[in-house]
Image (cartoon, grey):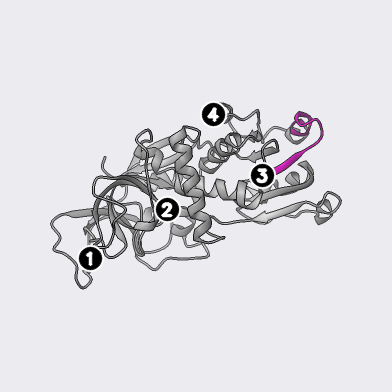
Amino acid sequence: MICEVVGCEFERGSGARAYDRAMQAIRVHQFGGPEVMKLETLPDPSPGHGQVLMRIHAAGVNPVDTYIRSGSYAAKPSLPYTPGSDAAGVIEAVGPDVKQWKTGDRVYCDRLAPGHGAYATHALCEADHVHTLPENVTFQQGAALNTPYATAYRALFHRAEVKPGERVLIHGATGGVGVAAVQLAVAHGCTVFGTGGTEQGRQLVREQGAAHVLDHREKGYVEKLMDLTGGAGFNAIVEMLANVNLDNDLSMLTHGGRVVIVGNRGRIEIDPRRTMPKELSILGMTMRGAGEAAVAEAHAHIVAGLRAGTLRPIVDREYPLSEAAKAHEDVMSDGALGKIVLLPLR
């Protein structure tokens, strides 16, 4: 499915500089299916105080982008809007008071300026939410960092509070957040187990350092996982599809175990009594739920891990910006292995 390319008017704010080139961006004028995304031509924005202008080389596609586009997400943006929150590229201009960045810096961002999205050739970013992209990391990998790695970091260390030596299950480990969680937990000294729906995906998870990886579609996989722990169970589980797996998760936790819900697509019936004898915890989270200081901590750790080589984002598929609709279809399909990214400059 190809997005339609159309022209549009862009209202300039007061004090805007004269625009000498055009940018392209995906715009959504009404909530709905992937076909509501249109590729439009807009004037380049100009960075204001505390902002930088990024020339986007790669933009990450996340499941939450599809929820927002469909109108099913709780927090709906004002229409029209440009989707996407994850981008990597090069700083093209800086605001008058920005000292920590300069043109030409390779960066990725964890927050775009209000009214801007990552599915574009350019975007304004808040300067305090821009991070160095080390030279050993590609722009495509940089676009795979913000939502997946910050979410995985917060799930493991802020919510589950995992410790070295603990047994950790990443339930649905083949997607962007799952791969990030495996790498982070392995680097932290945990014994990591994973699940995945395809052999290719399971092999990918093994390559990230997981000790054991099972097929969560296979009958009896819960018993097999428990056998691999010697019957002891897991100290922590990071759960990507709670509406399917949460009841099983409770049966696999050891005393004091924690399950962190990262993803959910519906309701589920569980027996709360299962939480009582072993004093289990069911923990919800969102990436920014603990405030900006928690997000900043996550990205400081992420950049350090990139430089050290312990964190290695996996990019599954790449699409030109004009195929954003196809990317939205694929990110919600089974069999994703790592991250799907858009390449605005292709």
Sequence-first tag of 4 and 1: 1
Q: Label 4 belongs to which residue?
A: 204
Q: Which residue lies furthest to the front in this view?
A: 99
Point 67% across, 36% down: residue: 216
Sequence-first tag of 4 and 3: 3
Sequence-first tag of 2 and 4: 2
Q: Position of residue 263 (x, y in %)?
A: 59, 50
Q: Which element carries disc 4, helix, strand or loop?
A: helix
Q: In this view, does 150 lie to the left or right of 115?
A: right
Above-or-below relation of 60 to 51: above
Q: Which amino acid does label 4 sit on?
A: Leu
> In the rendered structure, which segment of residues is drawn in magenta?
224-238
Sequence-first tag of 1 and 2: 1
Point 13% across, 57% down: residue: 20
Q: In which quarter of the image is residue 69?
A: bottom left
Q: Which element carries disc 1, helix, strand or loop?
A: loop
Q: Nearer the viewer, residue 80 or 262?
A: 262
Point 41% across, 54% down: residue: 85
Label 3: few (<14), some (14–19) or many (≥20) C-alpha neighbours in 10 Å: many
Q: Which element carries disc 2, helix, strand or loop?
A: loop
Q: Are the residues flagged by discs 2 and 4 in contact, CB closer than 8 Å?
A: no
Numbered label attached to residue 10: 1
Q: Label 3 belongs to which residue?
A: 162
Q: Label 2 belongs to which residue?
A: 110
Marks 1 and 2 sit apart, C-alpha to C-alpha, by 25 Å
**Front position among marks 1 and 2:** 2
Q: Where is residue 326 in the image (x, y as percent from the top left)?
A: 39, 44
Q: Position of residue 315 (x, y in %)?
A: 43, 36
Label 2: few (<14), some (14–19) or many (≥20) C-alpha neighbours in 10 Å: many
Marks 4 and 3 sit apart, C-alpha to C-alpha, by 23 Å
